[in-house]
Amino acid sequence: MSVGWHKAGLGGVDSHDGAAAQHAWTHARWVLLAGCLIAIPAFYVELLATTGSMLLTARVLYGAAAVACAAAVARTAWSSRKPARFLDRNAFDVAIACGALVSMIGGANPWSSLEWVLRLAFMAMIALRIVVALRTCFEPNRLALLPLAGATVLLLGGAGFYALEPRVHSYAEGLWLAFESSATVGYGDIAPTTPASRVFAVFVVLLGYGMLSLAFAGIAAWLIGKEERRLRREMHRDIKALHAEIVSLQRELEGLRDTLAPSRNGAQRGDNAGRQSGAG
């Protein structure tokens, strides 16, 4: 990873580390992603908890997220040549594992202002970690995945609003609200009214707007790349034609030189004979 990610505590495995650590991290980063994804329903189940069973479910989900994140980090650190350096490079993931573990404490509604701030900060960390984990989808050779990712965000956003917002009476209305939020249109016909749906709208705006922007950017990059490939083919064709013309000119020059060589040699012999007779 870049130096910036390293300073942010998302450095991954050092390129100079052993092959075992590199291999372990290849699988561990997806386990981390799974743990972060588990934390999202845990947050909302806890936010909407009205019974002890719902609160227990949220705590179980938080525990699963903590175990997944901690296991991924610990497994890679065990395989690393320098475990302390790896943990330092991935302090952000360590903090997420600790945050998921601490989130199992408390959780009963209503939340205090401090608990709101802490839980929202933890979810912001989760969102950032998910984006970083999925950044490989943004590489030029995987631009085709971006429209699919944008559509997935809209579909999941529609389901989330349908479950969290009482003014949304159908999945179609939830999907429409997700599109309004992610596209930052804001017609105002439907708006989030509950704390849960408003928090969800924040993440839909941040993630959905980013994914849609990247999706359209991916389409534009594909079209530009297609035009560049056409121009490159034309340039290669022109270069080949120019090379063929140069080779043809070289052959003509060689033939002309061979044609002029006998006459030039005869002239030189005549000049030599004239010099000899003049000297005699």
Image (tube, rainbow, N blue to C red):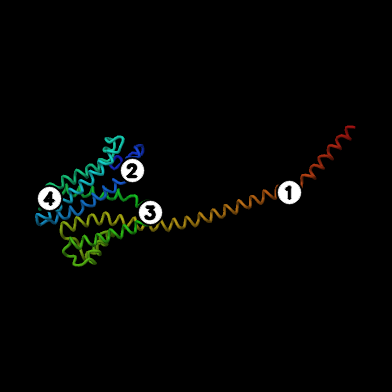
Please say if the residues under marks 4 and 1 sit with CB atoms less than 8 Å apart: no
Q: Look at mark 3 in the image and give the residue it sits on.
A: 142
Give whichever of 275, 196 is nearer the camera.
196
Considering the numbered disc 1 on the image, is that residue within a helix, a strand or a loop? helix
Q: Position of residue 280 (x, y in %)?
A: 90, 32
The residue that appears at 23% across and 45% down in the rendered structure is 69
Q: Quadrant of the N terminus?
A: top left
The residue that appears at 41% across and 57% down in the rendered structure is 222
Q: Amino acid at mark 2?
A: His
Q: Amino acid at mark 1?
A: Leu
| Residue at mark 3 to residue at mark 1: CA–CA distance | 56 Å
Q: Look at mark 2 in the image and give the residue it sits on.
A: 23
Which tag, 4 or 3, sits closer to the chain's start?
A: 4
Considering the numbered disc 2 on the image, is that residue within a helix, a strand or a loop? helix
Please say if the residues under marks 1 and 2 sit with CB atoms less than 8 Å apart: no
Which tag, 3 or 2, sits closer to the chain's start?
A: 2
The residue that appears at 17% across and 55% down in the rendered structure is 44
Which tag, 4 or 2, sits closer to the chain's start?
A: 2
Please say if the residues under marks 3 and 2 sit with CB atoms less than 8 Å apart: no
Q: Nearer the viewer, mark 1 or mark 2?
A: 2
Q: Look at mark 4 in the image and give the residue it sits on.
A: 107
Q: Residues within 10 Å of mark 4 (few under 14, many from 20)?
A: some
Q: Position of residue 270 (x, y in %)?
A: 84, 40
Residue 212 left/right relative to 105: right
Q: Is 265 situated above or below 224? A: above
Q: Look at mark 1 in the image and give the residue it sits on.
A: 256
Q: Amino acid at mark 3?
A: Arg
Q: Nearer the viewer, mark 3 or mark 2?
A: 2
Please say if the residues under marks 3 and 1 sit with CB atoms less than 8 Å apart: no
| Residue at mark 1 to residue at mark 2: CA–CA distance | 65 Å
Q: Amino acid at mark 4?
A: Gly
Q: Nearer the viewer, mark 3 or mark 1?
A: 3
